[in-house]
């Protein structure tokens, strides 16, 4: 709820730091789960990084590919990852990832991150989510940074916690704009799911 004010205050308090932020609902830490809190991570040395903003993500994020290229060229390409936060509810994260990957794939730089978070109430009320860079707050953008680890290694790992299902289906009806799957094998999805889960 106080993200814009927090972003401005952090930039004022740490004027020489590069500060990247995103709204989120949950903070997972060693002491448990928190909501309605501010979480921070600080890097003081041992890295080389560069940042940027991709705007107009609902319309034309690829227009900002030169911004990505400039940020990419400012860091060594080995031992580097690209991290992004994208505002939620724009249904644009795939477009942002395509923009980032258009530059990163050639150099084997992995891209990861996610959409800015909202509470369930905020989500269903279609309230805005935010990302920020250096105190400036955006509602239709993705903030990204390249981080190169100078003193150690940096790598990404993912784990698939799902097991293959015994059943396969063909999606036969979708609403692409609203991202809704309506039918599997010509049958309403709710009937298929009810049968699968008893």
Image: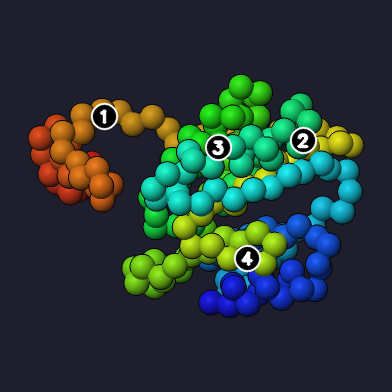
Residue found at x 65% / y 59%: 133
- SS for dot 2: loop
**Residue density around tag 2, few if under 14, some if 14–19, many if 20 or more, within 10 Å:** some
Which comes sooner in the sequence, label 4 or label 3? 3
Q: Which residue is mark 1?
A: 167
Check residue 65 in the rendering and tell me which mark sits there, or answer none: 3
**What whole-number distance in Å separates the C-alpha atoms at marks 2 and 4?**
23 Å
**Residue that numbered label 4 is attached to:** 136
Asked if residue 89 lies left or right of residue 46, the reply is left
- Check contact, mark 2 vs mark 1: CB within 8 A: no
Seen in the image, is 10 located left or right of residue 16?
A: left
Separation of marks 1 and 3 at Cα, in angstroms: 41 Å
Q: Residue at x 61, y 22 (%)?
A: 106
Earlier along the polypeptide chain: callout 2 or callout 4? 2
Q: Nearer the viewer, mark 2 or mark 3?
A: 3
Q: CA distance from mark 4 to mark 3?
A: 20 Å
> In the image, residue 53 lies at what x, y percent?
59, 50
């Amino acid at each position: 709820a106080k993200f814009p004010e927090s972003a401005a205050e952090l930039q004022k308090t740490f004027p020489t730091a590069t500060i990247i932020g995103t709204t989120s609902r949950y903070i997972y830490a060693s002491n448990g789960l928190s909501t309605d809190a501010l979480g921070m991570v600080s890097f003081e040395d041992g890295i080389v990084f560069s940042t940027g903003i991709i705007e107009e993500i609902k319309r034309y994020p690829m227009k900002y590919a030169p911004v990505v290229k400039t940020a990419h060229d400012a860091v060594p390409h080995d031992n580097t990852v690209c991290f992004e936060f994208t505002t939620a509810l724009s249904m644009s994260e795939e477009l942002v990832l395509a923009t980032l990957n258009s530059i990163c794939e050639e150099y084997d730089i992995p891209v990861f991150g996610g959409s800015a978070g909202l509470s369930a109430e905020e989500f269903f009320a279609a309230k805005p989510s935010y990302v920020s860079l250096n105190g400036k707050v955006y509602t239709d953008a993705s903030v990204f940074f390249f981080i190169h680890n100078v003193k150690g290694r940096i790598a990404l790992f993912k784990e698939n916690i799902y097991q293959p299902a015994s059943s396969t289906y063909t999606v036969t009806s979708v609403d692409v704009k609203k991202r809704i799957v309506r039918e599997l094998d010509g049958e309403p999805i709710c009937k298929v799911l009810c049968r699968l889960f008893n």
